[in-house]
Amino acid sequence: MRISIDTAVCIGAGQCALTAPEVFTQDDDGFSELLPGREGGHGSALVREAARACPVSAISVREP
């Protein structure tokens, strides 16, 4: 799995960090970012749910 965040679209709602805190966090400005080394989802079953929870669809999850 490969996760990406479109930072131009992200509004900092934080739903991803609330849903999958082991993969997502928020930067100092409140925008979503992946935790270091978690670009592949780190085996979290909640990554897809976090992408669906994003109100502006800024997160994409792709299979390699």
Image (cartoon, helix red, strand yellow):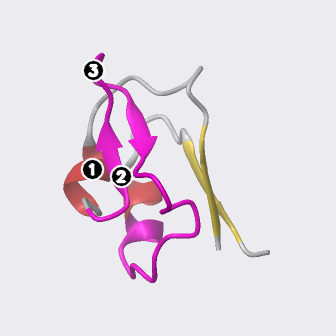
Span of residues in magenta: 22-49
Task: Name the residue at 40% across, 51% down.
Answer: 35
Q: Position of residue 37 (x, y in %)?
A: 50, 61
Real-space CA distance between mark 2 and mark 3, rounded to the nearest whole angstrom: 13 Å
Residue 7 versus residue 46 in the image, above or below? above
Residue 61 in magenta stretch? no
Reply yes or no: does residue 25 show up in magenta. yes
Q: Are marks 2 and 3 in contact (CB under 8 Å)?
A: no
**Front residue of 57 and 31:** 31
Instruction: Name the dominant secondary structure of the magenta segment.
Output: loop
For disc 2, the marked residue is 24
Which image quarter holds the N terminus?
bottom right
Which of the two discs, 2 and 1, labels the residue nearer the N terminus? 1
Q: Which residue corresponds to the image point at 29% horizontal and 65% vertical from the top-left?
A: 22
Residue named by callout 1 = 17
Discs 2, 1 touching: Cβ within 8 Å = yes
Left or right of 61 on screen, residue 19:
left
Q: Residue 32: x and y, percent?
A: 39, 36
Mark 2 residue element: strand
Asked if the residues shown at circle 3 and circle 1 are in contact, with their CB atoms under 8 angstroms apart, the answer is no
The kind of residue tagged 1 is Ala
Residue nearest the viewer, comparing 37 with 43: 37
Q: Residue furthest top?
A: 29
Tag 3 secondary structure: loop
Q: Position of residue 8 (x, y in %)?
A: 59, 20
Q: Secondary structure at mark 1?
A: helix
Query: Is residue 12 depicted above or below 19 in this figure?
Result: above
- Bin the neighbour count of mark 1 within 10 Å (Cα to Cα): few under 14, some 14-19, many 20 and up: many
Q: Which mark is residue 28?
A: 3
